[in-house]
Image (cartoon, coloured by chain):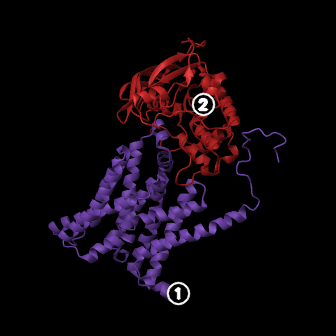
């Protein structure tokens, strides 16, 4: 057992994969917390779809320029497409009324269909495609690692450093506007940071499951927390635990690391959701009135009062 | 103007303000000047444009025409936002992710390009919560508080920066009477220290003693500006029904019959 573990940790491929999994687990819930707060849980999904087109365009350009390796531009392409997609989605959200919904759907489906089509034009195989759709953490190169670390640092600095302002704009945009805060710039910041997160997480779980890593840890955390700060911190811890344990499991069990991580996270959600009522009931056995200082709003005559 | 206290320099200056939402003009060419230290009620029936006017004044919705100056500066980046407190009409103070009352109030310490809470902001947030009677609830999740308490959290968020100008949009709608009285007392204290207050109200209620000037809107125009009007008699009737123009279709005949102003003015 110990030697197995040492073997896993000694494997350079696995070392890189573990570092990336750790970073992604830490980073994805940061932006996920803001997205859940403004009820945009599916934004990450949309960005992921668009990022696939970016990956494919990266391949195409790489091929045309005869770069080696020919997928050198895949991740930069994804970063670019994800940022453009996220900003477009944000602008549609800010201006749109009913048509926004349809515009977003067009963007999502266009993103994935365009990605698949361009990928085949660029000479990508189905295996390449599946790698981007469902993650390919076992093939992380040291170049990927550097990019992941850099993007993660950006997300953490912005997502945690600007927490008060991002919270303000996600919590009550109207109030933020009336406080003279640069609401549009902050919204675009959230969109761009979400885009960077998507491209970082894409490596681990693939574009189709990217949103799960951003949202599910937050969903678990908010079952047990009462403050925004704690929710974010707890979600980050959960993210790291599920990413590392999911990856570790698939070192021995032949299964998709991305899918294993997401299933673990959702399993954790189910477990916490099931156990929580029992814990809460035990804690509240004294049955306290949650609003002890609220006065009656009707006058009871002495005959009615019990 | 029939106020007996001479108002100071203009804190709010709106000239010819027109606001349209979705192409429909809601506020039509309003001129409104409010001087330092005034306490003004903005009254009118549902759909008369009072909320929209206040939201335009603080830049939440853009004015189609006209100019707005707050504390002497044209609406925009140069407005000293740290001196202005705004309490939006109650949206639930709770959102997707849990947040404590003090976290919500803390966001009131940000303004303009000050995106980080200043030193001591946590203590100010607690003090602001204590001032609305929620000192003990500071670390509770907002979603576990009652509606009236959530409303008070939003008021604390506006008060945390000690504003010189306070704009409140229906702050006591649906709030129980004791809370209304506490709120009225808190506003009276603020007014006594020279805070300018513009408050959107459906009826004067517990705030009546405080209000010297009332501005009444009807169909987006000012139809009265002066001493507080007396409520229309049927307003106090138990059978009185608040009609909302957005509930039904908006043909003129329907409007004429359905949306009678709920206030009447003297003289």
Is residue A3 positioned above or below A15 on the image?
Answer: below
Answer left or right for B131 relative to A140. Answer: right
Chain A shade in the render: purple
Q: Name which residue lies at 70% across and 51% down.
A: A290
Q: Nearer the viewer, mark 1 or mark 2?
A: 2
Q: CA distance from mark 1 to mark 2?
A: 78 Å
Q: Position of residue A46 (x, y in %)?
A: 35, 59
State the residue position of label 2.
Answer: B240
Say if B11 sits above or below A98 in the image.
above
Give above or below for B86 relative to A129: above
Which image quadrant is residue A14 in?
bottom left
In front of the other: B146 or A43? B146
Dot 2, crowdedness within 10 Å: few (<14), some or many (≥20)?
few
Provide the chain ID for the residue under circle 1. Answer: A
A121, A201: nearer the viewer: A121
SS of the residue under disc 2: loop
Q: Where does the C terminus of chain B fall, quadrant-wise?
A: top right
User: Mark 1 vs mark 2: same chain?
Assistant: no
* Residue occupying the point 52% across, 33% down: B243
């Amino acid at each position: 057992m110990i030697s197995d573990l040492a073997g896993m940790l000694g494997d350079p491929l696995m070392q890189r994969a573990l570092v990336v999994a750790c970073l992604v687990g830490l980073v994805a819930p940061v932006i996920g917390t803001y997205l859940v707060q403004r009820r945009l849980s599916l934004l990450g999904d949309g960005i992921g779809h668009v990022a696939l087109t970016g990956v494919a365009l990266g391949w195409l350009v790489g091929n045309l320029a005869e770069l080696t390796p020919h997928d050198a531009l895949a991740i930069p392409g994804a970063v670019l497409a994800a940022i453009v997609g996220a900003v477009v989605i944000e602008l549609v959200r800010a201006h749109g009324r009913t048509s926004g919904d349809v515009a977003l759907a067009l963007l999502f489906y266009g993103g994935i269909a365009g990605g698949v089509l361009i990928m085949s034009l660029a000479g990508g195989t189905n295996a390449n495609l599946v790698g981007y759709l469902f993650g390919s953490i076992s093939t992380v190169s040291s170049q990927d690692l550097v990019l992941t670390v850099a993007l993660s640092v950006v997300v953490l600095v912005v997502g945690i450093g600007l927490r008060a302002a991002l919270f303000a704009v996600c919590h009550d945009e109207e109030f933020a506007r009336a406080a003279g805060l640069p609401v549009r710039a902050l919204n675009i910041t959230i969109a761009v940071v979400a885009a960077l997160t998507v491209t970082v997480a894409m490596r681990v779980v693939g574009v189709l499951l990217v949103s799960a890593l951003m949202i599910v840890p937050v969903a678990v955390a908010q079952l047990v927390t009462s403050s925004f700060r704690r929710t974010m911190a707890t979600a980050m811890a959960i993210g790291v635990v599920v990413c590392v344990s999911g990856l570790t499991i698939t070192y021995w069990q032949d299964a998709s690391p991305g899918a294993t991580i997401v299933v673990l996270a959702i399993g954790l959600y189910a477990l916490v959701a099931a156990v929580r009522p029992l814990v809460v009931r035990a804690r509240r056995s004294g049955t306290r009135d949650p609003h002890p200082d609220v006065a009656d709003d009707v006058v009871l005559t002495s005959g009615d009062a019990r | 103007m029939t106020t007996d206290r001479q108002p100071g320099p203009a804190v709010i200056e709106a000239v010819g303000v027109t606001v349209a939402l979705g192409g429909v003009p809601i506020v039509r060419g309003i001129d409104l000047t409010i001087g330092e230290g005034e306490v003004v009620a903005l009254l009118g029936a549902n759909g008369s444009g009072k909320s929209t006017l206040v939201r335009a004044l603080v830049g939440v919705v853009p004015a189609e025409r006209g100019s707005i100056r707050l504390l002497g500066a044209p609406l925009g980046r140069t407005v000293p936002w740290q001196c202005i407190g705004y309490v939006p009409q109650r949206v639930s103070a709770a959102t997707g992710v849990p947040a404590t009352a003090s976290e919500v109030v803390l966001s009131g310490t940000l303004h303009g390009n000050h995106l980080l809470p200043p030193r001591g902001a946590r203590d100010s947030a607690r003090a602001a919560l204590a001032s609305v009677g929620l000192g003990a609830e500071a670390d509770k999740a907002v979603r576990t508080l009652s509606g009236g308490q959530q409303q008070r959290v939003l008021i604390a968020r506006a008060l945390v920066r000690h504003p010189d100008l306070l704009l409140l949009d229906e702050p006591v709608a649906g709030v129980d009477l004791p809370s209304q009285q506490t709120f009225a007392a808190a506003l009276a204290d603020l007014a006594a220290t020279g805070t300018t207050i513009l408050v959107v109200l459906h009826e004067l209620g517990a705030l009546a003693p405080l209000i010297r000037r009332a501005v009444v809107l009807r169909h987006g125009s000012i139809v009265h500006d002066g001493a507080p009007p007396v409520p229309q008699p049927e307003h106090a009737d138990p059978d009185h029904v608040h009609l909302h123009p957005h509930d039904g279709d908006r043909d003129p005949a329907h409007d004429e019959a359905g949306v009678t102003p709920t206030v009447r003015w003297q003289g």
